[in-house]
Amino acid sequence: MAAPDSSPVLSLRGVSKSYGAVQALRDGRLDLFRGEVHALVGENGAGKSTLVKVLAGVHRPDTGEVVLDGAPLGLGSPADARAAGIAIIYQEPTLFPDLSVAENIFIGRQPRARGGAIDVRAMETAAAELFRRLGTPMDPSRQARGLSIADQQLVEIAKAISLEARVIVMDEPTAALSGHEVERLFGVTHGLTAAGAAVLFISHRFEEITALCQRVTVMRDGAWVSSDPMPDLTVDEIVRRMVGRDITSLYPKQDVEPGEVVLEVQGLTRAGWFRDVSFSVRAGEIVALAGLVGAGRSEVVQAVFGVDRADAGTVRVAGRPLKLGSPRAAMAAGVALVPEDRRQQGLVLDMSIERNTTLPRSRQLARFGLLTGGRERASAAEWTRRLQTKFHRLSDPVGTLSGGNQQKVVLAKWLSTNPKVLLIDEPTRGIDVGTKAEVHRLISSLAAEGLAVVMVSSELPEVLGMADRVLVMHEGRISADIPRSDADERSIMLAATGQDALLGGAA
C-alpha cells in the first residue's frame, strides 16, 4: 500500500442537502488521502448515500463545498465527477447486459480504426490489459449478461482505472459476495491504493472495515461525528458513535420453551438445487439454515413457501399437508416469507409505504370489494409504529426509505397476516448495526409469542446469537443439526464444508 499523502486529494466541507422538508445531510465532512482506504460508517439514514450522490454529481449540495487538490470543485453532473477522476462502484452495478465486457468499459469512448469504425481488437486488448493490472483475468469479449455481481463490480473497477480515477467510492461492495469473492475484491483494492488511488469503503461489516481500512469516518443523523485512524478505535466505540448510545446486546435472544411442532418438512427435493431435506420447527423455536453460498438454503425456504415447485417431498403446517408450489396455499396455511432480495422480491418500490405494508391483506381490508385509503392507512400506521419504522409520509414511495426501514416494511407486511411460520432469508443483510439489534429483538420476541422461525443467514455471529438449532447445509443436503449449546464457528464450518464425519454425521 502506498503511503498516504499529508494533504487530502478530496475533501467535503460542511455539505448539506435537503429533499423538501427532509434534511438528508446537514454537515457532511470527509478527507480522502491517496494510497489509503477510508471507511464511511453510519446507520441507515445517517446520510451516507446522500453524501455519495453528492460525490457522484447526482445531487448538488445546498451548502458547503467539495474540494479537489485544494481547489473548490463544482459537480453538476455524473460527467463532471468522472472528469474529475471520481468513480462510484455501487453494490448492484448497472452494466448493459447485451454488450460485451470491453464495450461496457469503453462505452462512449471506444477506440476507432481508420474510417471511423470501432476498433474491436484494440478495445478488447486494452480491456485485457486493465484486468491484467487488476490481477483478475476476464474475457473482454464475453457478454455482460450472466456475470456474477463480483465480476460486474470488477468491470466497473476496470472502467474506473481506464478513466484514470483518483478517487474510487465502493458502496456496500461485499453485500452479495462470497468469502472468496470478498478476498479477491480486497486484493484489487490493495492494488488500487498501491497505485496511489484514494478509496472510500462503505460497509456495515466491521470485520471487513478493521481488516481493510486505515481511517474511519462516522456519521449520524445526516451529520459528521468523527474521523479517526482505525488503530485508535474499537468496534464498540464505532458502534456507540454510530447510534449515539450503547447497544447492550446485538443478539437479544430470549429463552423460550418450544411448543408443538408447527412446520414439518420431509424428503423435500428440487433437482439440481437440493435433495432429501427433512427438518421440523416447533412453536417458539428459531432454527437457522447455515452453510456456504450455493448450498441450497434460500432455495429450500422458497420451495417451502411455494415460490419454487419441489420435485418430491412433503410439507406440513400444524399437522396439515401443504400444497407444494403454491404461495397462495402457503399464505392461507399461515406461512410468511421475507425474501433475501427485499428490493426485487419483497417490495414494489414505486408503490407507497402503506400499500406495500398491506398488500397481502388487501382482500381482508376491503369493504364490499373496495379498498379504502382509511382502512389501509390505519393498518399500515399500526404496523410501522410497532416496528419503529422511520419515514416522512406513509404515502411516500417505499423506495425512498433506507435499507433498514425497507426491511421493516417487508416484515410488517407479513407479520400483519398473523403467521404461524416465518421464513426469513438474510434478515439483516445490508442494514446497520442499530437496526440489526432491532430486527433481532423483534424476531426473538415473535418467537417468544409462539411463532416458528426459519432463518437463513450467512453471518455466523447472527446464527450463533439467535438460533435455538442450526441446520447446516452442504451441496444441497443437511449435513448437521446442531443444538444451540453445541454450536460454534468451528462445528458449523466443518459441516458446511462437508466434513460432518468429524461431528458424528448429520442428525
Image: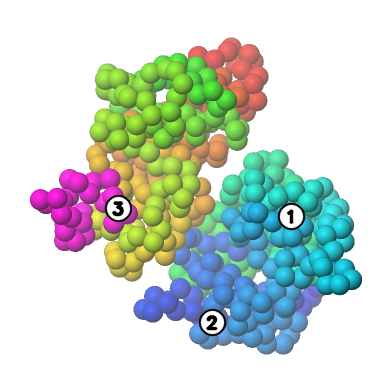
Q: How far apart are labels 2 and 3 at the CA level?
A: 33 Å
Q: Which callout, 1 or 2, points at the residue further toward the start of the chain?
A: 2
Q: Kindly report which numbered mark, 1 or 3, lies closer to the viewer in this rendering.
A: 1
Q: Are marks 2 and 3 in contact (CB under 8 Å)?
A: no
Residue for badge 2 = 61
Q: Which callout, 1 or 3, points at the residue further toward the start of the chain?
A: 1
**Number of callouts:** 3
Q: Amino acid at mark 2?
A: Pro
For the stretch drawn in magenta, the main secondary structure is: helix
Circle on res. 283: none
Locate residue 202, reporting x and y percent. Answer: 61, 60
Residue for badge 1 = 101
Looking at the image, which is closer to me, 439 or 343? 343
Whether the magenta-drawn stretch holds residue 374 is answered as yes
Mark 3: few/some/many CA within 10 Å (<14, 14-19, 20+): many
Q: How far apart are labels 1 and 3 at the CA level?
A: 39 Å
Locate residue 196, reporting x and y percent. Answer: 82, 67
Residue range highlighted in magenta:
355-379
| Residue at image location 79% in from the left, 52% down from the top | 140
Locate residue 315, reporting x and y percent. Answer: 36, 21
